[in-house]
Amino acid sequence: MNNVQSVNIQHIIQRAKKGDTEAVTALYQQYAPVIYRYVAYRAPSTTDAEDLTAEVFLKMVEGLPAYRLTGVPFEAWLYRIAAARVADFYRRKKPISELSESLTDSRPLPEDALQTAQELDNLRRVLRQFSEEEQNILILRFVERKSHKDVAEIIGKSVTAVKSVQHRALIQLARLFGEEKVRHYLRGEHE
Amino acid sequence: MSERRYTPDSLAERLDELLPPGQPEQVNQDGDPLIQAAAWLTSAPQPQMSSEAMARIQAQVIRVQQMQRSSSRPRFPGVARWALAASFALVVLFAGSIPSSLASVPGDFLYPVKQAVEQVELTFANSPEASAVTHLVHAERRSQEAATLLTRGQFNPILLNGAIEELSVAAQIVRSGDNFDSALKDDLQRRTVIVNAQVNTVLALVGDETQVPDSTVVPLLTEIHATQESGGLLLPTDTPTIMPSPTSAPLTLMPTLTPIPALTETPTALIPTTTVTPLPPATVIASPTSTEIATEALVLTSTPTSLTANLIIEGAVEAINDNVIVIYGFEIELSPGDPLLLVIKVGDVVRVEGNFDGTIVIAILVTILNVDVIVNETGEVWRDAGDCSNPPPPWAPANGWRARCEGQQPGNNGNNGGNNGNNANNANNGNNGNNGMGMGMGSGSGS
């Protein structure tokens, strides 16, 4: 970790709110990888994930002047924008095809990237069987390794509600593990 | 079967042990299907945006940001809004006759004219009332000038000293008058509070808006603060003061009111004190000066620091507008879903820990001090009506009510804690994860 703790995020945000391009760039560079990762689990393809990430940060720029510092981390605000963008994306789009990442994306992929893409496809297909809220909680809790409290702040629910949805979703996921078709998705891990 | 073995709470606890948050390298399993399912998710691939996409989107974001900046009207910072408000007051006061020189600030061509006009004003103020008003108007002008200069990145300590001196003279005149009109006195007091707050705001923002070093600000701050604390101004005895810390000069609005230990039928009774207790440095959000910012890399931590209160204010609620309450003229925004909004009333004495962004205070922790208010984890709220008309629900300790009303109301459970209930609203220590994005605060509990 860089020795940057002394730089208070609030000052960066305040500067970004005032139109400081350098501060906006700093926010983008800090949070884009995190937001992209979150979006990539939920979007059907890399191209869509990139487009959605761009939308999130354009919304950030648009919303910064009105953004107010609160007890909720800035990152949570971005996650919320991202969640809304993903939900809107699926409302606008036709039902997702079952084509894999490598087929839906026209760009050629090297072998290791192809494997990652296939694993990502597997995860997406599994996640697609959950509600939007369950997907958010599963991703944030176990992929991003956020605490219950952090997840509660991001999704705007109580910690109790997060624990409850987490419990329900993991039961469903565990049941899916027992089904043959999911074993196929999870190859190499639990076969 | 694991679904039967684990409750949501026990599963959460177990997951925290085996897959601790924030520690992706730690993945432990115990053979349980639910834990296995969670552990499988932790091994998910970590997609990364290509550098080409990263740069392309960044360029897009910056282009839009610059377009937005160039097309938007200049926004007035918080201080400028204060200045505008004060200007409006001046315009009303001198309707139709205010010369343009009155809008000038030190360094302007017309400023000497303004100073001459003020001498004339004092000369023609031939009654104690008129004299007090004139000195207060001059105080308003000095603080407005200081605020205006601050928006230009300049700081003039003489103006702040001048504002405080003018307030002090006005107060002396008011206090020496035998038959001073009470309505006028109230008005002057209200305006003194505003000027005083504006002076404090300018002082608190100097470090952010100018290159003025702490070595210049702190002595001035100490001197002004001493005057404010001396009782020489027309301030209510419980008016808060802003006390930037000597090291980082952050905005630290200090309390204090001390509740009378015994709850009475007139719950607003409070003992004001003049104690100023700076927040411990560790809890104060560092406000690096412009100089420090300029030398720091614009890189953020990957896990942003949780927001900490940089301001504490205690006082009576003057107004409530939706989810915004007003104390000493400061607008304090609570979460729209905050249960306290269901019961808080004008006149309640509250303690707010929050963040002041120069315009509005965003509350993090709100506590009603003079009335027993209890919020439970599900957001239900109970307020002591001050008599026995509103019995508390079983979940509310409400020791004050029970001590007072035990035996007088049916359904009383006899739980006489003997507590006066002054601070029972702190009973809500659960989380309140329902905060909207625009806010992050609790009801006597924080977020």
Image (spheres, coloured by chain):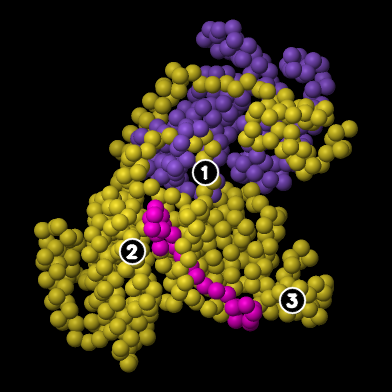
Chain colours: A purple, B yellow
The answer to whether A36 appears left or right of B214 in the picture is: right
> For this rendering, which residue is in front, B157 or A156?
B157
Q: Main secondary structure of the magenta part?
A: loop
| Residue name at image x 58 percent, y 24 percent | A40
Mark 1 or mark 3, which is nearer the start of the sequence? 1
Residue lying farthest to the bottom in this orientation: B178
Q: Amino acid at mark 1?
A: Thr
| Residue name at image x 23 percent, y 77 percent | B134
Circle 2 sits in a helix, a strand or a loop, which is it?
A: helix
Depicted B270 relative to depicted A144: above or below:
below
| Residue name at image x 49 percent, y 18 percent | B50
**Cα separation between marks 3 and 1:** 41 Å
> Residue A85: image x %, image y %?
54, 32
Mark 3 or mark 2, which is nearer the start of the sequence? 2
> For this rendering, which residue is in front, A76 or B387?
A76
Residue A136 drawn in magenta:
no
Which residue is identified by label 1? B305
Which residue is identified by label 3? B418
Which residue is identified by label 2? B221
Q: Please report the bounds of the magenta region as a residue range.
A: B243-267
